[in-house]
Image: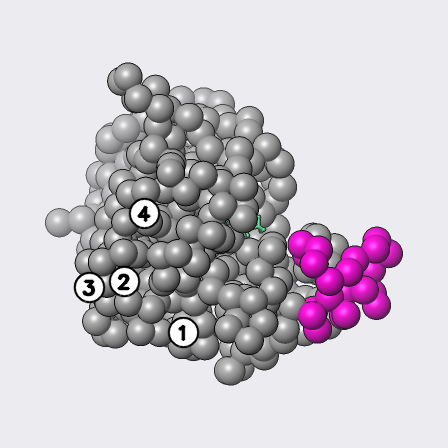
Amino acid sequence: MRIPIKDVTPETERAVVIGWINEVRDLGGLAFYILRDRTGFLQVTIVKKKAPEAVIAAAKEASRESVVRVTGSVKATEKAPGGRELIPETFEIISRAESPLPLDVSEKVPAEIDTRLDNRYLDARRPRVAAIFQIRSTVTHAVNSLLYEEEFINITTSKIVAAATEGGTELFPLAYFEKEAFLNQSPQLYKQMMMAAGFEKVYEIAPIFRAEEHNTTRHLNEATSIDVEVSFADHHDMMDLLERVVVRAYTSVAESCGPALEALGIELAVLKTPFPRITYAEAIDIAALSIEEDISYGDDLSTAAERAIGEEMGEHYFITDWPTEIKPYYAMPYEDNPTVCKAFDLMHPRMELSSGAQRIHEHDLLTTQIAAKGLSPDSFSFYLQPFRYGMPPHAGWGLGMDRLIMTMLGLQNIREAVLFPRDRHRVTP
Ligand code: ATP
Ligand code: MN
């Protein structure tokens, strides 16, 4: 029976392991084959005078990154990784890798991100890369657990839609029989409709599609969004929930991803709560003091502005009370000052992680706001109708999973946090 490499200890007597050949060192009379599986590394030591002929012959044929099955006895030795080595009795090539390899898995030769992504299956054999996706899996699990504990209903909504969520040109058109259709840029309208359906607390972790042309290290054309919507809640409740979700993600990773964090060589930040909350007006003041470019109340926050404010804040923080004009039509304006709305962004010092708001739940106000953004209420009739038949007050947010992982692990490029990223220039693999 095959055992995982991490379970081969200096006390193990005999072992059958299957793994990839990470590295070969042939010293003449002695050869070392370092085997790798997803749990670790194991040195197979072949003493040519003593090893069976068949073992020597097979090992000679085995190229780097081939899959091999080795059986033998285990010996304690301080010189090998993990303090043990395997002395082979049988050595069998299960799947031979061609040479040369398109990418050096052992990381002796550094590779550009494009080469890595072109050969993602090889890139992901690297423990450092695999660690990112182990952690991402843990984060997904942690978010699911928290939201189930809080009695959310996990929903799945269609990614093929007829109308833009927020208007604009950021849509990918689709060949859909005789109709015009697009890939959805956000589940916003659908999760709000489920508030009309009385589900009260819903969430979805799914792709969003943005046909944005910009090519940055924090935007992709297909991203994963954690989207929630809650009835009878306001923007304060939703900031509290967002904080719980982010904190749970970090603590779960800290508790259960020790080896992965070690492979990445990082120490996870310990988050202090509550996250500070500043208003948009305060954020603008901070930015105006520290950046070159002109910025004033009513402007979107540029990348430079986000960075400057992030530097000042130094930790996760919320920006609240945005001008109604620069937030989507569905954000609820304050009753006493409708030029400001109950919207918020969650920021990591490096970038925006999430946007949310209390939503408008009155049909007529929503219709007015859609028109005020230059959109046609007619194309939103499927969305507007539920607001006429008992729509509860509600609030929600969308949190970018890829950016959450990127900032958590200090990755330089969002592409590192996504297995098969989609950008302006990349649709394969
Ligand atoms: P930005 O201003 O940074 O481009 P946004 O305000 O357009 O983001 P939202 O529509 O508010 O993004 O989406 C909510 C969250 O989804 C964002 O805070 C971000 O974490 C994530 N997100 C949105 N667009 C992208 C994208 N193109 N690539 C990666 N993540 C994204
Ligand atoms: Mn946003």
| Tag nearer the camera, 3 or 2 | 2
Q: Earlier in the sequence, mark 4 or mark 3?
A: 3
Q: Tell me where residue 93 appears, x and y as whole percent.
A: 27, 30
What residue did someone put label 2 on?
391
Mark 3 touching mark 1, by CB under 8 A? no
| Rendered-image quadrant of the C terminus | top left
Residue at image location 51% in from the left, 66% down from the top: 333
Whole-Å distance between the Cαs marked 4 and 3? 15 Å
Mark 3 touching mark 2, by CB under 8 A? no
User: Pointer 4: residues within 10 angstroms few (<14), some, or many (20+)?
Assistant: some
Name of the residue lying farthest toward the top: 178
Name of the residue lying farthest toward the right: 292
Q: Which residues are magenta?
A: 281-301
Whole-Å distance between the Cαs marked 3 and 1? 17 Å
Can residue 136 be seen at all in this image of the molecule?
Answer: no
Judged left or right of residue 313, residue 371 is left
Q: Judging from the image, what secondary structure is the residue with disc 3 in?
A: loop
What residue did someone put label 1 on?
234
What residue did someone put label 4 on?
383
Q: Earlier in the sequence, mark 1 or mark 4?
A: 1
Q: Tell me where residue 103 appears, x and y as whole percent.
A: 51, 31
The residue carrying mark 1 has its beta carbon less than 8 Å from ligand 1: no
Q: Judging from the image, what secondary structure is the residue with disc 4 in?
A: helix
Mark 4 touching mark 3, by CB under 8 A? no
Where 22 falls versus 325 (above or below)? above
Q: Residue 277: name its quadrant.
A: bottom right
Q: Amino acid at mark 4?
A: Tyr
Towards the viewer: 283 or 195 = 195
